[in-house]
Image: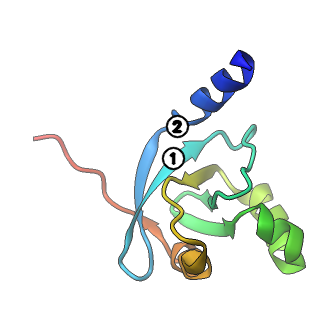
Amino acid sequence: MAGNYSKVVSHNFGRHSHWQGRSGRAYDLASENIDHFCMGDAELYIIAKGAHVLWVGSTSELVNDPLSRSRFRLALDCADRVFRLLTPGADAERLSTIWDLEGAEPLPEAQAA
């Protein structure tokens, strides 16, 4: 049991970034290692190249949507980063969150004074 606990704890310490969706809503994202990330069942992921979002979704999209599965494979071939949404929100908002994040861009980080 302790081995599984360590894996979960280390998984949650990615570098955080802040992105803004096409609606103007701000999202907190955690960086994942693109070569070794493992998707959780209920979490949303953003696959990107630089500041350009290539794919947004979860394991549900990969299992249930052949078009999303194709886009996911293509995105992985081109991507240089993966993010996990820290607060996915309610299931009822899921599709609108995916739509919003598909047009997201990174927010400028706060500058030190």
Q: Amino acid at mark 1?
A: Ala
Q: Residue at x 60, y 73 (%)?
A: 91
Q: Is residue 74 visible?
A: no
Marks 2 and 1 sit apart, C-alpha to C-alpha, by 5 Å
Measuring from the top left, give residue 27's x and y in whole percent: 42, 62
In the rendered view, tell whether residue 54 sits above or below residue 96. above
> Of 78 and 19, which appears nearest the observer?
19
Q: Residue at x 45, y 68 (%)?
A: 105
Q: Is residue 24 left or right of residue 90?
A: left
Residue underneath mark 2: 14
- Name the N-terminal-most of marks 2 and 1: 2
Residue found at the very far left of the displayed protein: 113
Q: Amino acid at mark 2?
A: Gly
In the rendered view, tell whether residue 63 sits above or below residue 16. below
In the rendered view, tell whether residue 63 sits above or below residue 85. below
Query: Which image quarter: residue 50?
Result: bottom right
Measuring from the top left, give residue 41's x and y in whole percent: 74, 55
The secondary structure type at the circle numbered 2 is loop
Q: Residue at x 64, y 21 (%)?
A: 6
Q: Is residue 49 left or right of residue 103?
A: right
- Badge 1, how many Cα within 10 Å: few under 14, some, many 20+? some
Q: Is residue 64 left or right of residue 11?
A: right
Measuring from the top left, give residue 81's x and y in whole percent: 62, 50
Q: Residue at x 48, y 58 (%)?
A: 87
Checking the image for residue 30, the label placed there is 1
User: Which quarter of the image is occupied by the C terminus?
Assistant: top left
**Labels 2 & 1 near each other (Cβ < 8 A):** yes
- Badge 2, how many Cα within 10 Å: few under 14, some, many 20+? some
Checking the image for residue 81, the label placed there is none
